[in-house]
Image: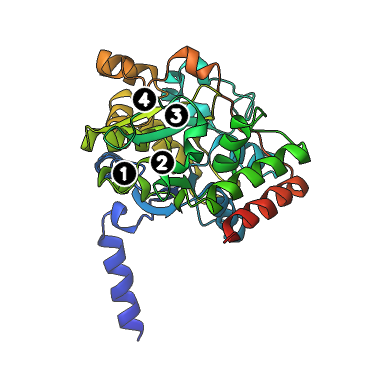
Amino acid sequence: MKKFLIAVCVLFMLLPACALADEVVNVFNWEDYIDESVLEMFTEETGIKVNYMNFTTCEDMIVQVEANPGAFDLCFPSDYIIERMIKKDMLAELNYANIPNASQTIPYLQNPAYDPEQKYSIPYLWGTVGILYNTTMVDEPVDSWSIMWNQKYANNVFMLDSIRDSMGVTLKYLGHSMNTQDIPAIMSAKQKLIEQKQSGVVKAYQVDETKDKMVAGEAALALVWSGDAQYAIDLNADLAYAVPQEGSNVWVDGMVIPKDAKNKENAEKLINFLCRPEIAVMNCEYVRYACPNAGAIELMGEAYTSNPVQNAPEEILAKCEFFNDIEPAFLSIYEAMWMEVKNTK
């Protein structure tokens, strides 16, 4: 046994240092939300292995991060969830000395309300929420949320299986803020969504699968995020996208490091890599959402800046709101009302 142990020790001494190092970064991101070749390039350049895991909604993400301390080094939550994570002291402060490429963030997204001093997050991608529609099935202007309640499109409308998005656009349609905490306003939105479902307009509540089903012509209209809209339009020229005149949500998905991350410096290396303009271009062109990186926008040129789906005009953004975090006690009211909608027959 002693000879065996000595032999093992000698073998380990002879192995190159990189073979013994446990250089990893554990990433928790949305489904289909990065060009996978970027991760391979990062590993080739740094020697850091990326363990890549997916979530479907922000609410699922924060539950998993809380339930599994130390399991994730880098997460990609939306703005209002970043605000919540900061309030709950769940995030590590970023060391910007390790992230010089963060200076590429466009002015519009610097020092946002959800992270005023930008201590904890750097924008990854951003966009709007609107209506993706099939021009061969819809023969009228798509300029109001009211079309999503039109019985002319019975069993032909996909809604997002997301409390904030579906409730939010309904509040906008009814003339309220997406961040309202006025109970009668929220109840009116709930009732409007129940009416939409009971009238037979809603075909399904979905998330990631909607874009491919719209490409396949399975519905006339869908509530979608702008990047999913651009992805679908790229594959089906009959599709178009609109943000209604009542306004909508403008959102940011950021890069954050949980406070109990085991590989913080590796996570910061990956953030810096993702903020490199040519890498940001790769992800923007793959995922099709709006790019927060000034250097990347310059590289993409007019093909990007003239695209109103990816690069929403100022007059559209002026009508949009960022989501604010909702206090847990009030969030339970939203959740209860959303369950009433989903359980309606």
Considering the numbered disc 4 on the image, is that residue within a helix, a strand or a loop? loop
Mark 1 highlights which residue? 214
Element assignment for label 2: strand
Q: Within 10 angstroms of label 4, few (less than 14), some, or many (20 or more) residues?
A: many
Amino acid residing under circle 3: Gly
Q: Give me the residue at 66% from left, 46% from top.
A: 191
Q: Earlier in the sequence, mark 3 or mark 1?
A: 3
Mark 4 to mark 1 CA distance (whole Å): 16 Å
Q: Which of pointers 2 and 1 lies earlier in the amino acid sequence?
A: 1
Q: How far apart in space, not on screen, are marks 2 and 4 (Cα)?
A: 15 Å
Q: Going from the N terminus, do you reach mark 2 or mark 4 first?
A: 2
Check residue 309 in the rendering and tell me which mark sits there, or answer none.
4
Q: How far across and how far down the image is residue 57, in percent?
A: 50, 49
Q: Nearer the viewer, mark 3 or mark 1?
A: 1
**Is residue 208 in sight in this rendering?**
yes
Q: Quadrant of residue 114?
A: top right
Instruction: Specify which label sits upstream in the sequence, 2 or 3.
Output: 3
* Mark 2 and mark 4 residues within 8 Å of each other at the beta carbon: no
Residue found farthest to the bottom:
1
Would you say the residues marked 2 and 1 are in contact, meaning their CB atoms lie under 8 Å apart?
yes
Q: CA distance from mark 3 to mark 1?
A: 19 Å
Residue 298, how many percent across, how many down? 31, 14
Amino acid on which the number 1 mark rests in the picture: Met
Residue position marked by numbered label 2 in the rendering:
222
Q: Residues within 10 Å of mark 1 (few under 14, many from 20)?
A: many
